[in-house]
Image (cartoon, helix red, strand yellow):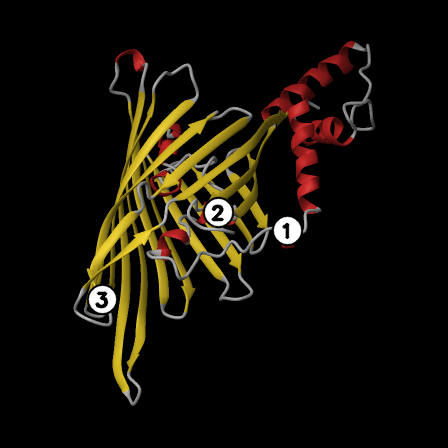
Amino acid sequence: MKIHTKLLFLVCIGLFFIPATQFPDVCFAAGEPASFLLVGVEARSMGMGGAFTALVDDSSAVYWNPAGLGLLKNREFSGTYGSLFTDTTYSFMSYAQPVFACKKEKSRIALGVGWLQLRSLNIEKTNQEESLGETRMVNDAFFVSGSIQPVSSLPLYLGISGKRITQNIDTFSSEGWGMDLGMLLGGEGFLTWGVNIQNIGKTQIKGTSYWSDRQVKEVIPCHIRSGVVLKAKKAFSSLVSFFKEEVHGGEYSIYEPRISQNPQALERNKNSLRKEENESIDIKLNIAFEFDYIPDETDSLKFFQGIECWLHEIYGLRISFLDDFSAGASLKQGHFKIDYAFVFRPKLKDTHRFSLAILF
C-alpha cells in the first residue's frame, strides 16, 4: 500500500473520533445582508458539507471558487433545485467552458456564468390589527467568472468573479455589485489548496427601505474561504487484488493461489490475469477540510469537512458529519451527471437537492 493511501486511511479514522461540538455552527447567518448567498449551491457540494472551495472542478466554480474553472475538461451546463422549507425554494444554473486561446497552450483560460435564486412565496403581510394579504420575496445573484492557468507546467489557477445581487420583497428592492477572487494550487495532484475571497472591498447593496421611502445601504462583509483536499486514486486489477493489497497488506493469502509450473496451468493463469485486467476496479478518494472567516467579526470562524469516494469515475458517494449531517450520491454516464444530496438540520427542515449536469 502506498504512503498516500495509508495517510488518507488514518485521516479518515481520525475524523470519526472528532466530536462535532468542537466546531461552530455551520448554518448561514440569517441576519447578514444577502445571506442567501451563504446557503451553498449544487448537490455534490452540499453532500460534502460545503467543503468545496479546493475541490470544485465543474461549472459551479462560478460560485465556489472561480479558479476551479481551470480544471474543466469539457463544456458544462448544470442546474440545481431544492426545497429549503415551507414555500421556499433554491435554484442554481451555470454554464462554463475551457478556452485554449493562447499559443502552444502556455496559458489555459476558462469562462463561466451562473444564476442563483432564493424564492419565498405566500408570505403574510400584517399590521398590529389585521392581515394585509400575501406577498413574496425573490433574491437573485448573477455571476460572470473567468480563470487562467498562467503556465501549463505549473498547477496554479487564478480566478475572478463579478456578481450582481438583487433583493425584492413586495414592492421594495435593493441591488449591488460584488467581486470574488480565487486561487487553486495543486489541481489534480495528491494535495490541492484553494482560497476564495468573497465580496472584495465589502459589497454594498443600495435600495428602498421596507419601512420607509428613504434610501438605505447595506454592506455584505468580506468572507475568506480556504481549504485543502487530499486525493488518492488507485486501480486494483480485481476485487481479489483489492482484498489482497488493502486487507492483507500485500502478503500472500488465500486470495492469491500459488502458480504451478505446469504449462497448461500457466496458460490458464495468464488467461485469468487478462480477465482480471478487463475487470479492474478504479477507486478515487477525496477528503476536504475548509474554513470560512469574516475578518471584521469576532467568533466568525466556521469549519467544514467532507469525504467523497468515486468508483470507476461513474458512481460517487459522499458524507459530512459536523454540525449538520449531510450525504450524497452521484451517477455519471456519458454526457450526463446526476447528483443528489440530503442535509439533516435539527433546527430546520431537512432538505433534498438534485443537480443535473450536461457535459459536451
Foreground tag (3 vs 2): 3
Give the structural element (helix, strand or loop) at label 1: helix
**29 sits to left or right of 307:** left
User: In the image shown, does 235 or 226 lie closer to the viewer?
Assistant: 226
Locate residue 47, reporting x and y percent: 51, 49
Compared to residue 256, the image places residue 61 above or below, namely below
The kind of residue tagged 3 is: Ser
Compared to residue 167, the image places residue 227 above or below, namely above
User: In the image shown, does 213 or 285 lie closer to the viewer?
Assistant: 213
> Which label is found at residue 143?
none
The kind of residue tagged 2 is: Gly
- Marks 3 and 2 sit apart, C-alpha to C-alpha, by 32 Å
**230 sits to left or right of 262:** left
Give the structural element (helix, strand or loop) at label 2: loop
> Which label is found at residue 209?
3
Compared to residue 126, the image places residue 108 above or below, namely above
Which residue position holds label 1? Answer: 22
Quadrant of the image occupied by residue 212? bottom left
Compared to residue 336, the image places residue 245 above or below, namely above
Quadrant position of the C terminus in the picture: top left
Count of all numbered marks drawn on residues in the image: 3
